[in-house]
Amino acid sequence: TDQVAIISGASRGIGRAIALLLALQGAKVVAVARSEEELTELTHKTRGLSIVADIADDTDAQHVVDETLRQYGRLDILVCNAGVGSFNELENFTAAEWDRMFDTNVKGTFLLCKAAVPHFKKQRRGHIVGITSDVARRTFPHGTAYGASKYAQDALLGSLRKEVRPHGIKVSTIYPGLVDTYFNDTTPGSAEAEKTHLRPSDVAQAVRYVLEAPPHVVVDELMLHPITQEW
Ligand code: NJP
């Protein structure tokens, strides 16, 4: 296809895998993150565009959509994947850590959608894919800040789905379990994680599946786990 897809958080982990898979399938990929070097390296592979941006900043988020339209003249897909998480007892979280999670996971999703939706409405077509988490649907210790941010991101996407459906715009939410990435300062690729975690490419395949639904079908929600994950 000649579809144009913006992918936030594409410098590593899940977003990078989504960018590579969609590029392989012929999409023009716009990779977004704050790390310029990783994005440049990725762009050599995708032959797409990269935009250095902090999605929690409203000027940056608007710039991502404006620049995509300027360069490619179209936008079909927005993947809201960028996210951060840290885990601790409630009283050990600083207010700054709380803000960092909500600014990235919730406000960042809001700002990118806010920038893309007017364009999608005008063309009466568009697909927003949100990468939330299985913990958008269950609580767990040490997850007060991250879990709350993922519930909020999930509610945002669920409300938006109902709001934009009459305009022909799809919103699909993906809920992965554990994924072997750089998330929470981990290093992917260990033999142990291979047994206990999804690979980023597994989540990319889920994104591909929701994007390939026929025009009259929207996959609202898709949850996937490593078979070893108990909760
Ligand atoms: O994490 P990681 P994942 N503006 O750390 C970018 C969810 N999830 O791939 O800006 C723009 O390898 C960052 O780029 P950079 C999770 O909540 C994960 O696992 O250069 N970009 C990097 O490309 C998140 O929503 C697991 O630092 C920003 C990317 O985000 C999504 O999956 C389980 C940014 C993060 O890559 C991808 O996370 C689950 C900003 N302000 C859900 N801040 C899991 N890994 O187990 C960060 O259920 N980025």
Image (spheres, rainbow, N blue to C red):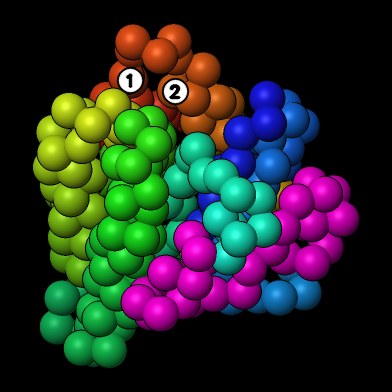
140 lies above or below 231: below
**N-term-proximal mark, 1 vs 2:** 2
Of helix, strand and loop, which mostly describes the magenta segment? helix
Residue 25 picture location, percent across and down = 72, 27
Q: What are the residue bounds of the magenta stretch?
A: 39-66
Judge by depth and name the residue closer to the eye, 40 or 123: 123
Task: Kindly indicate whether the residue at mark 2 contacts the one at mark 1 (C-beta within 8 angstroms).
Answer: yes
Task: State the image quarter where residue 3 is shown.
Answer: top right
| Residue 160 sits in quarter | top left
**Can see residue 174?**
no
Mark 2 lies on a secondary structure that is helix
Q: Tell me how far mark 1 sits from mark 2, CA to CA.
A: 6 Å
Which residue corresponds to mark 2?
Answer: 210
Instruction: Name the residue: 72% across, 58% down.
Output: 49
Viewer-nearest residue: 66 or 231 = 66
**Is 55 covered by the magenta stretch?**
yes
Report the residue at 31% width, 49% height from top. 117
Q: Which residue is mark 1?
A: 219
